Image: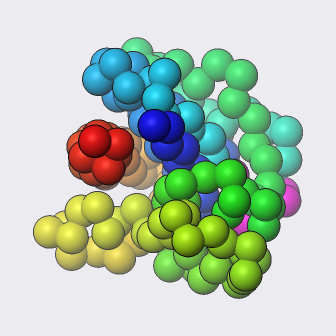
Amino acid sequence: MQASVLFVCLGNICRSPMAEAVMRHLLKEASLDAQVTVDSAGTGDWHLGHPPHEGTRQELDAHGISYEGMRARLFRAEDAAEFSYIVCMDSKNEADVKELIGAASSPQTKVFKFMDLLPERGTPDVPDPYYTGNFDYVYELVKEGCERLVERIRSDLQ
């Protein structure tokens, strides 16, 4: 059985590529990388084709996590049929994704907010470090949430 994860944020240069890179790293460590594919996308088109933001790259470098070859791309309605988990970094991204996919969503596609993985944190959204500059805090949330998502996927694959 296979699974696929798509992380979605606004510009696809900060939060969602950080989550993509961390998730790939964790899946490899868990020997699940052959069973689970991971990608990221944005709901806005300002940064299409750009690599992750410098702050994201610095944070990933500090933790020895690769982001090689990653480039910003736009979320497409067709993604709903291609991914089993669509994980939105904030409430606005989730609303935009649901509006874009409409009827294109397949019954097995799970669309949810990233912070649903961390309910004890008491915050609905992953803050956007493009505006806050707080890349280390976002990394902390992303790592913790991705660890939970790996366990959820492991369970779903059984």
Horizontally, is 69 left or right of 61 in the view? right
* Residue 1, above or below 114: above
How is colour applied across the structure in the image?
rainbow
At a point 35% along the width and 76% down the height, the residue shown is 124
* Residue 117, above or below 60: below
Q: Is residue 44 magenta?
A: yes
Residue 158 screen position, x and y as percent: 28, 42
The quadrant where residue 139 appears: top left
Q: In the rendered picture of this protein, how many numbered marks are placed on residues?
A: 0
Q: Is residue 26 magenta?
A: no
At a point 48% along the width and 22% down the height, the residue shown is 34
Q: Is residue 52 visible?
A: yes
Residue pushed farthest left? 120
At a point 29% along the width and 61% down the height, the residue shown is 117
Q: Is residue 42 visible?
A: no
At a point 63% along the width and 46% down the height, the residue shown is 40
Q: Of residues 86 and 56, which is closer to you in this image?
A: 86
Quick one: quadrant of the N terminus? top left
Residue 3 screen position, x and y as percent: 49, 43
Residue 148 screen position, x and y as percent: 25, 48
* Residue 55, above or below 91: above
The quadrant where residue 43 appears: bottom right
Residue 154 screen position, x and y as percent: 29, 40
Secondary structure of the magenta portion, mostly?
Answer: loop
Horizontally, is 132 left or right of 9 in the view? left
Magenta extent: 41-46
Horizontally, is 153 left or right of 120 in the view? right
Q: Of residues 101 and 17, which is closer to you in this image?
A: 101
